[in-house]
Image: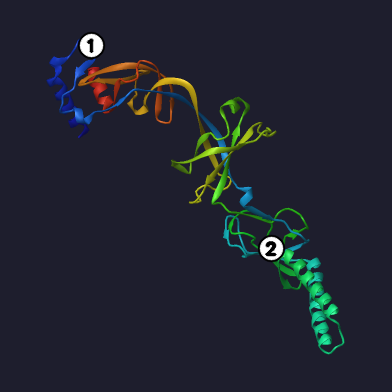
């Protein structure tokens, strides 16, 4: 079909060959073929610079809760794995601790003391003050134990999830020994909003600023772009990678952006320089040179151009075109080849 269409086009050109003008590469296109040709005006726009930085997705610290043990002990059982979604109040760990065993014993004594004091008060052998003191002692012990989790007796207590979210860090298995205020046992993050942290090296710092528009992309989603703006730029260089960090806050409703996922961050910066621009799809590369097909009514001609740069579907022209001219953006290669006599 493509070959047939091409041959038909050649016939249309041949029929109009008597209308050639003085330029050897200019011809008049038959009106029957004109609907198959699309054109666009050459424009003048501000030069938009593009910079690509490497980055990674991180959980928003303001939406993340980390649990560190408050007592020493041993993990009896773990109820979750890395990446699990958990709900607030869901049991995460069972931990046995000698310290908590003593507290549980004290709690049991405090409950019996309260019951005994209530009985003595009923028989007139205790005062209201003694009952209040017994009640206060019990409430304090219950509050102390609540700091560690839900008491299961025999020195075992359960740690529950403080928020709903995804487990992004996990340490320790059943049988692991833990120490008070030691390494965190797990972190839970609400990933409905995430951070993207991009590394900005000294040479690029002049092109990066707060509020700048960015496009975030990942190899996991090659045809998708996440739009955002730079929310924060650190003022201290990281000694390891010798770069500042630019932070972008992104909504993550579909949870496509995963914690620690590598991404690419494109930054766009408009300059005050005006340049001639055309759609990138109009450019033809031939014999290490760049061309476009210029349209003037039904007259078409090939013209060599010099490209300054390309950015986001737009080609900036250094030489060869003027704003207001018309160029072919559809079937331009077919027209170009015929004008060259191929």
Residue 50 falls left or right of residue 37:
right
Q: Is residue 136 above or below residue 290?
A: below
User: Crowding near pointer 2: few (<14 within 10 Å), some, many (20+)?
Assistant: some
Q: In the rendered image, which quarter contains the N terminus? A: top left
User: Crowding near pointer 1: few (<14 within 10 Å), some, many (20+)?
Assistant: few
Q: Quadrant of residue 160?
A: bottom right
Q: In the rendered image, which quarter contains the C terminus? A: top left
Residue at 34% over, 17% down? 322
Q: Nearer the viewer, residue 60 or 199?
A: 60
Q: Position of residue 87 (x, y in %)?
A: 58, 62
Residues at discs 2 and 1 in contact (Cβ within 8 Å): no
Residue projecting furthest to the bottom: 123
Residue denoted by label 1? 23
Residue 121 falls left or right of residue 335:
right
Mark seen at residue 174: 2
Q: Position of residue 70 (x, y in %)?
A: 76, 59
């Amino acid at each position: 079909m493509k070959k047939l269409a091409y041959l038909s086009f050649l016939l249309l050109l041949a029929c109009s060959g008597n209308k050639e003008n003085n330029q050897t590469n200019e011809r008049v296109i038959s009106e029957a073929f004109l609907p198959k040709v699309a054109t666009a005006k050459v424009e003048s726009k501000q030069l938009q610079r593009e910079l690509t930085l490497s980055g990674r997705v991180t959980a928003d610290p303001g939406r993340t809760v980390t649990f560190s043990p408050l007592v020493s002990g041993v993990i009896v059982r773990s109820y979750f794995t890395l990446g699990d979604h958990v709900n607030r109040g869901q049991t995460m760990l069972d931990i046995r601790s000698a310290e908590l065993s003593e507290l549980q014993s004290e709690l049991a004594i405090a409950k019996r003391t309260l019951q005994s004091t209530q009985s003595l008060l009923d028989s007139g052998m205790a005062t209201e003050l003694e009952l209040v003191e017994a009640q206060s002692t019990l409430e304090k012990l219950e509050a102390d134990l609540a700091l560690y989790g839900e008491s299961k007796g025999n020195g075992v207590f359960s740690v529950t999830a403080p928020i709903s979210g995804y487990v992004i860090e996990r340490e320790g298995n059943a049988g692991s020994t833990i120490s008070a205020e030691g390494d965190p046992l797990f972190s839970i993050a609400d990933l409905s909003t995430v951070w993207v942290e991009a590394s900005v090296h000294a040479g690029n710092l002049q092109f990066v600023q707060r509020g700048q528009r960015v496009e975030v992309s990942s190899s996991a989603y090659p045809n998708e772009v996440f739009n955002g703006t730079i929310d924060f730029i650190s003022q201290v260089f990281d000694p390891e990678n010798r770069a500042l960090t630019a932070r972008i806050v992104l909504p993550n409703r579909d949870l496509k952006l995963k914690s620690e996922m590598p991404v690419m961050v494109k930054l766009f910066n408009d300059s005050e320089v005006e340049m001639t621009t055309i759609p990138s799809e109009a450019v033809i590369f031939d014999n290490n040179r760049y061309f476009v097909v210029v349209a003037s009514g039904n007259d078409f001609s090939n013209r060599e151009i010099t490209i300054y740069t390309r950015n986001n579907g737009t080609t900036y022209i250094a030489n060869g075109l003027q704003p207001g001219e018309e160029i072919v953006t559809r079937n331009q290669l077919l027209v170009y080849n015929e004008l060259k006599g191929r």
